[in-house]
Image (tube, helix red, strand yellow):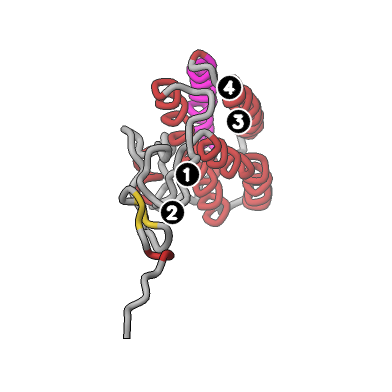
């Protein structure tokens, strides 16, 4: 009985045609998927960006994606933990703010993919790239929660402003426009939380 060869498992130039295991994206930020020797990757490229320009853009997208996920988780953590007279106001407000930032998670990830990248997803990677720390402790106090969020949002808003200029200089005007929109959303949420902090009754 002769053994049949299977084209399904054959390899060309070291690239399997099927059944390939995962490979790690290249580059400093492990975001470059354009040069991977793996199945279904032949047409992945950086479109109109040079390698250097992609490096600038991918670093910001990787970091901002991780930051947005972390900000979502921080809002959720505070949403669950808040207690006291401002419980209902903040419990509901945090979910409203989540609705405002949540679409940016998929948008930033897909923008990176569209430019030949591979987005972070593992919890350890998200923690490493994010500029927002998700609390491991339980914070009940309303003022402590809101103050921490205003500090985070100030940093994130400035980051989007700076990153918008950086990617614009790297000839990625589309991502720059995205960042300008996200900056406006972050600034609005920051303003709303600052207004709450002006209440002397906030415990």
Look at the image and give the residue range highlighted in magenta: 146-168
**Outermost residue toward the top in this view:** 169
Q: Are marks 3 and 2 in contact (CB under 8 Å)?
A: no
Q: Residue at x 64, y 43 (%)?
A: 103
Residue 141 forms part of the magenta stretch: no
The image position of residue 202, as x and y in percent, is 59, 39
Residue 195 appears left or right of 153: right
Q: Which residue is mark 1?
A: 70
The image position of residue 119, as x and y in percent, is 46, 43
Q: CA distance from mark 3 to mark 2?
A: 24 Å
Residue 154 forms part of the magenta stretch: yes
> In front here: 51 or 188?
51
Label drawn at residue 176: 4
Q: Residue at x 43, y 45 (%)?
A: 120
Q: Counting residues from the N terminus, which is met first, the one under dot 2 or under dot 1?
A: 1
Label drawn at residue 186: 3
Q: Residues within 10 Å of mark 4 (few under 14, many from 20)?
A: many
Task: Label 1: state its secondary structure.
Answer: helix
Q: Counting residues from the N terminus, which is met first, the one under dot 4 or under dot 2?
A: 2
């Amino acid at each position: 009985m002769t053994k049949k060869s299977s084209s399904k498992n054959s390899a060309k130039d070291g690239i399997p045609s099927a059944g390939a295991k995962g490979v790690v994206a290249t580059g400093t930020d492990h975001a470059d998927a354009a040069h991977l020797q793996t199945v279904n990757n032949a047409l992945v490229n950086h479109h109109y960006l040079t390698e250097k320009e992609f490096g600038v853009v991918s670093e910001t997208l990787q970091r901002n994606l991780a930051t947005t996920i972390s900000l979502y988780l921080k809002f959720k953590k505070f949403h669950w933990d808040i207690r006291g007279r401002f419980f209902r106001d903040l419990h509901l407000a945090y979910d409203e703010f989540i609705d405002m930032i949540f679409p940016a998670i998929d948008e930033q990830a897909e923008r990176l993919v569209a430019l030949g990248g591979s987005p972070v997803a593992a919890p350890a990677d998200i923690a490493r790239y994010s500029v927002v720390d998700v609390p491991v402790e339980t914070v009940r106090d309303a003022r402590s929660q809101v103050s921490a969020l205003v500090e985070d949002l100030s940093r994130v808003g400035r980051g989007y402003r700076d990153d918008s200029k950086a990617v614009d200089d790297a000839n990625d005007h589309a991502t720059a426009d995205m960042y300008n929109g996200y900056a406006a959303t972050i600034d609005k949420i920051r303003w709303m939380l600052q207004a709450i902090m002006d209440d002397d009754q906030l415990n």
